[in-house]
Image (cartoon, rainbow, N blue to C red):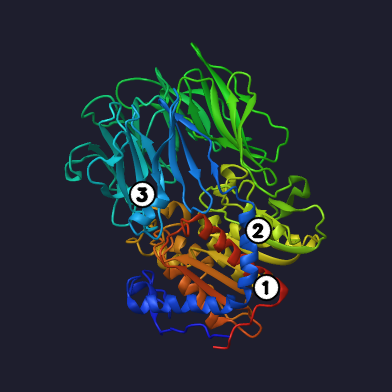
Amino acid sequence: MTSAPRAARKGVLHDIHGVQRADDYHWLKTQGKADPEVLTYLSAENAHLDAVMAPLRDTQAAIYRELLSHVQEQDDQPEVVRGAYAYFQRTLEGQAHAIFMRRPLTGGPEETLLDLNVLKVREGLENVWVYRAVPSPDGRLWAYLLDTTGQEVFELRVLDTATGELVGAPLTGLSGWVLDWNAAGTGLYYATDDATQRPDSIWRHTLGQPQTQDERLLHEPDATFRVAALTTEDGGTLRLVSQSNMAQEWWVLDTAQDGAQPTLLLPRERGTEVPVLTDAGDHWLALTNHGGAEEFKLVRFPKRAGTLDWADVQDVLPYDPARHLTGLLLFRHHLLLSGREGGFTRLWVLARTPGGYGPARRVEFPEDSVTVRIGANHVFDTGRARIVFTSLTRPVEHLDLDLDSLGTTLVKATPVPGYDASLYVSEQTWIAAPDGERVPVSLLRRRDTRLPAPTLLYGYGSYGFSMDPAFSIARLPLVDRGWVYATAHVRGGSELGRRWYDAGRLAHKMNTFTDFVAAGEALKADGTARELVAMGRSAGGLLMGAALNLRPDLWTAVFPGVPFVDVLSTMLDDSIPLTTNEYDEWGNPNHADQYAVMAAYSPYDNLKAARYPHLFVSTGLNDPRVAYWEPAKFAARVRDLAGPGSGTVVLKTIMGAGHGGSSSRYEYLNEIAEEYAYALAAVDGTLPTLDAP
C-alpha cells in the first residue's frame, strides 16, 4: 500500500491564556490554500486515497449505478407561481445541472431562463451554484446569485427575459442570502460581507447604475451580529434584520418609495428573541420568547409612530411549553404557522378575521412520524398554501393545503424508480443519556434485515438544526445490503424544542457528544448494531471528532465530513469566517471559563495515542465555513497518534468546491458511493491497515 504523506513540523501555539498547545501541522493554515507546498500535500493525500480505494472502485461503481437507478434523471420540479408566470427547474438525462424555466400562466411556450450546463461549459467553470433567483414584479427581468468557486462569494446577474441578454455588468462580491426587488422593478436589494465573510451590509442597487453608486441601507459594526433582508408576503415592505443567536433588531422600509430609508422598528435586547416578524396591515406579527416563552409564542404589535413597545404587545397564540414555534407565513385571509410538538414537525392554520385571528387548527396527517414544512409560496391573495411532506420511507411530496378545510391535494410526488416502500420499515427508539435524559433515535431498515446488522449512525446536534426523518435515496445502497441507517437526535438540535438546543450548546456542549456515544452503545446493547459506522458533516463533523475521542473502540469507521474539529484555533482567530458570529453557539475563548469548556472537547486538541478505527475525512479547498486545514490537520494527527491495530486514515480534498461538495448531481452521487464503498470494506475487514509511521 502507498504510504500516507508525512509533513509534521514541530510547533507550539501560545494562546491568550498562556496555554501552550503543540501543533505540528499549524503550517497548513498559515501558509494558505494557494501555497504550492500546501497544494502538493493535499494532492498527496488525494493520491493516498486513490491508492486505498483502488481495489474498491468496482464496488464504488456498483453503488453509484444503484444510486443513479433511483434517480428520475429527466424531471421537472413543482411549479411555483410568481406574478404572471409559473417558475420551475428541469433536469435532463445525462446533464449534471438544473435548467431554470418558466411558463406564462395565460398559455404560451416555456422559456429557458438559465441552463447551468451551458453556462458551465461556456465560461469554463468547474462548479456552479445558484442560491437565490427572483423575478421582477412584472416578470420582465430575472435576477440570480451565482457562485462558481464554492467560496460562497456571489455575483448578481440580471437577465432581460425579452432579449435573453444580461442587463448591465454583474455585481460582484455579494453575500448569497439576500436578493429582492423594489416594487417598481427598477432596483434590487442585496447584501455584502465583511473581511470575515460575515454579512454586515444591506445595499440598494438601481438598474443602469454602476455598483460603485449603490446605496448602503444598513451596516452592522458589531462582529457578533449578521444582517439579512426579505420583503413581506405582500411585497410592500422590506424587512431588514441584524441578528445574533440571542437577539434580533428589526428595520423596515417601503419598497414602493424611491429613496426610502430604513426606520428602526424593534431595537435589539439581548435575551429577547424575535426571529420572525412581518407586516400584517394594521399591526405587526412576530414570534418571540419575550416574557419567558422559551418555546416561543405568536404575538401582535399595533402599528404606531416610532419603535414598537413591548407594553403594547398582545398574544395571538398564547404560550404553550409543549409547542415549539419556528416560522410563519401570512396570506390575505389566513396565517400558516410551523413548529414542533412531541418531537415532530407540525403546521397550524389560523383564519384572519376583521377582529383578529381564529383558533389555531393543526394540520393532521395519517401518521405522526413525518416531516412537514412550509414550501415555496409567493401568492399573497390565495386560499391554498404549498407544503412539503416526507418520512423515512416516503419520498418527498409537494402538496397544496386548503387553508379553510385543511385538506391537501398532491401536486407532485418525487419519482424514485426501483423503490418499493413496502420493503422498508422505520422506527423510533429512545435511549438513556448518561445524565438520564431520554434521546430519540430514528431507524430505517429493510423488513427482511436480520439483526444485529451493520449500522450507520448519523448525527449533527448544533445551531438548533433538527435532523428530521426524511426520505433519501442515498441510504438505499446500504439498507439494501442489510444495514440499519440510524439518526441520533442529540441535544444541540431542536427536535424536542428550544430546551433541546440550549441543553447542547455553550457550557452544555458535551451533552451533544455523550448523547451520540450513548446512542451507539445502546444500539449495540439492544441487538440492533453488530458493527457501528459513525457519520456527520460540518458541526456534525465536530460531533464525529468528539465521539472518536470519547470512544475510539466503539466505531468500526468514522466519517467526519468538512469537520469543525480544530475548535480552539478557529474560535481564537476572529479574522476568519463565522468566528465572532458564533460566540453564542460555542463560547468566546477570550473568556477563560468558556475557553476551558471548548478545550475539554475540541477534537484536534484532545486526540491521544490510541487504537483508532478507520477514518475517512473529507473537505473542500474553497470551504469558507470550515477551512481545509482543520480536516487536514485532524487526519494527520490521528495518523501520528494511531497505535497498533488502528485502521486506515484517508483525507479527500475536492479542489474546486467548498462546504457543500461538488455542484454536479452525478459527482454528488459518486462521492456518496465512494464513502459507502469504504464503509463496506471497513466492516468486511478488507481495508488495508495503516502503515507504521
Q: Residue under circle 3?
A: 146
Task: Say which element carries label 1.
Answer: helix
Q: Is residue 135 left or right of residue 659?
A: left
Q: Is residue 509 left or right of residue 448?
A: left
| Residue farthest toward the bottom in the current orientation of the protein | 692
- The picture quadrant where one finds residue 141 is top left
Count up the numbered dots: 3
Taking 505 as reference, is 140 above or below it? Answer: above
Specify the amino acid type for callout 2: Glu
Taking 645 as reference, is 215 above or below it? Answer: above
Specify the amino acid type for callout 3: Leu
Specify the amino acid type for callout 1: Ala
- The picture quadrant where one finds residue 676 is bottom right
Cα–Cα gap, marks 3 and 1: 39 Å
Q: Residue under circle 1?
A: 681
Callout 2: 10 Å neighbours few (<14), some, many (20+)? some
- In front: 157, or 575? 157
Residue 304, percent from left and from top: 34, 20
Q: Residue under circle 2?
A: 66
Residue 691, percent from left and from top: 58, 86
| Residue farthest toward the top in the current orientation of the protein | 354
